[in-house]
Amino acid sequence: MNIHEYQAKKILSEHGINIPAGQIAYTPAEAKRAALKLSARGPWMLKAQIQSGARASGHFISHDAGHKGGIRMVTKISNIAYETAQMLNNVLVTEQTGPKGKPVNKVYVEAFRKIKRSFYAGVVINSSISAITLLISGVVNRDIVNIATAEQSKILSINLFAGEKIAPEQIKQILSFLDLDDSYYEVMADFIAKLLHTFIECDAKMIEINPVGITREKTFVALDAKITFDDNALFRHPDIAYLRDDYEEDERVLKASKQGFQYSEFDGNIGCIVNGDGLALEAMDILKSRGYETACFLNVRGGVEKDKIAAGIKIIMTNPRVEGILINILGGFLRCNLVADGILAATQELGLTMPLVARLEGTAKNEAKAILEQSGLPILFADNTTEAVEQLIERMEVNS
C-alpha cells in the first residue's frame, strides 16, 4: 500500500525525523490560510498530492494549469490561491503515472526550508538475499531505478540482515561516499537509525527520502517522502491501513485488495496467478531466463472461495498488457478444484482469447484437472513451474 507525501512525512516525524512544517489544503482559500499560518513572509512550497514521483517535472493536461509542474515555489502570498487553483481538479501527468495521469484533489502547503546541499536516502527489502538494503546517493530528484541501472557507482548499498544494526564503520562509509566530514557523524548516525527504525516498526517495503536536505546548522530534514507498506502486515497497523486512498489505487489493484489478494503490475506481457511469494519469484526468474517479463502477479494466498478466484482471474484477463496466463498453484488450504471452478466462471463471462497454462499441485489436483478437461477449454497442464513456462511461451509464439 502506498500513501501520500504529507502522510509519509507525518509518520517520519512521529519517529523523530525532521520535516518542514506543512498543512494539507483542499481549496485555494484553505491553501492561502495554511501558508499564512506557516509563515508570514514565505516563500512556500506548493505540492500536488498524487502518489507518484517526478511531480516537479510533470505537466497538467489542462492548459489552464500553466506550464509549471506539480511542485512549485511561491514567493508571494497573493499567488498561493492562484497557483493552487491551477492544480486542483486538474490531471497531473508524470513519467511514473503514464499518459493518463492522476487527478489532483488536494495540495500540501509547506514552509520553505533553506539548505546548502542534499542527498538521497532509501530503504528497501532485498528479497534475493533476505536483507534490508540501505541506499544512499548524492544524486537527488531522479528515479533511483534509472540511476541503479545506468550509474551504479553513484549509489552506495548497505545490506543489513535480521537483527543487525548499522555499524559505526558503515556510518563513516556513508559520510565518505557523500563527501561529508566527521563533524556529521552523530547527526548521520541518528538519522539512519531513525530511518531504519521507522522501516521496521511500520512493516514498510520501501521508504524513500528524495531529497534529504542538509541545513547550515548541520541538521537533516526530509524534503520529500514516499513509503510503501507490506499489505500482509497491515492488520498490525490499523492506523496506517486507514490512510489508504482508494482514489489513488489502480482499479485492478483496488479490486484485488478488496478480495484480499495482493496484485502488482510490471512491464511484460505474461499474467501470473500464484498462491505464495515463493511461487511468484520462481515463475518470474524462469520467465526472465527465457527472455520474457511479467505483466502482473496476483497472489491469492490462503484458502478462498470459487467466486473470489474467478474475480482474481478476471483482474488478470482484463489487463491489456497480458498476452498469456500462467497459473501456478500449490494446493493446501487452497483446494485446486476451487481454482478450476474459478477459471470456468471467469472464462464463461469473458471468454478465453489467450493461451493459459495451469500448474495445479496438491489438494484435489486430479479433480481440478478433470473439471478443466471436461470444459473443452484450450487449457494446457504442467507438472512443474519450468514446464508451465515453456508450454506457455511455446503457445504464445505460435499465436504471434
Image (spheres, grey):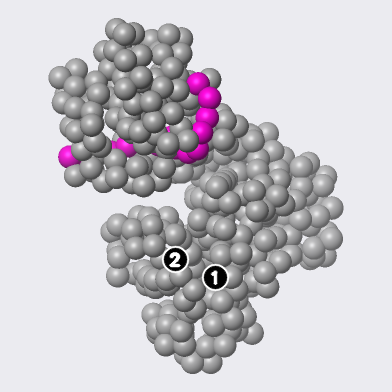
Pointer 2: what residue? 132
- In the rendered image, residue 278, in percent from the top left (x then y), is placed at 36, 47
- Asked whether disc 2 touches disc 1, contact meaning CB atoms under 8 Å apart, the reply is yes
Instruction: Between residue 168 and residue 165, name the one nearer to us.
Output: 165
Pointer 1: what residue? 196
- In the rendered image, residue 199, in percent from the top left (x then y), is placed at 56, 64
Q: Is disc 1 surrounded by few (<14), some (14 to 19) or many (20+) residues within 10 Å?
A: many
* Magenta span includes 63: no
Q: Residue at x 56, y 46 (%)?
A: 231
Give the left or right position of residue 186, taking residue 236 as reference.
left
- In the rendered image, residue 183, in percent from the top left (x then y), is placed at 53, 92
Q: Is residue 173 above or below residue 373?
A: below
Q: Residue at x 42, y 87 (%)?
A: 169
| Amino acid of disc 2 | Ile
Sequence-first tag of 2 and 1: 2
Q: Which residues are magenta?
A: 290-306
CA gap between label 2 and label 1 equals 9 Å
| Amino acid of disc 1 | Leu
Instruction: Between residue 109 and residue 275, name the one nearer to us.
Output: 275
- Secondary structure state at the residue bearing disc 1: helix
- In the rendered image, residue 191, in percent from the top left (x then y), is placed at 58, 77
Q: Is residue 12 above or below residue 169?
A: above
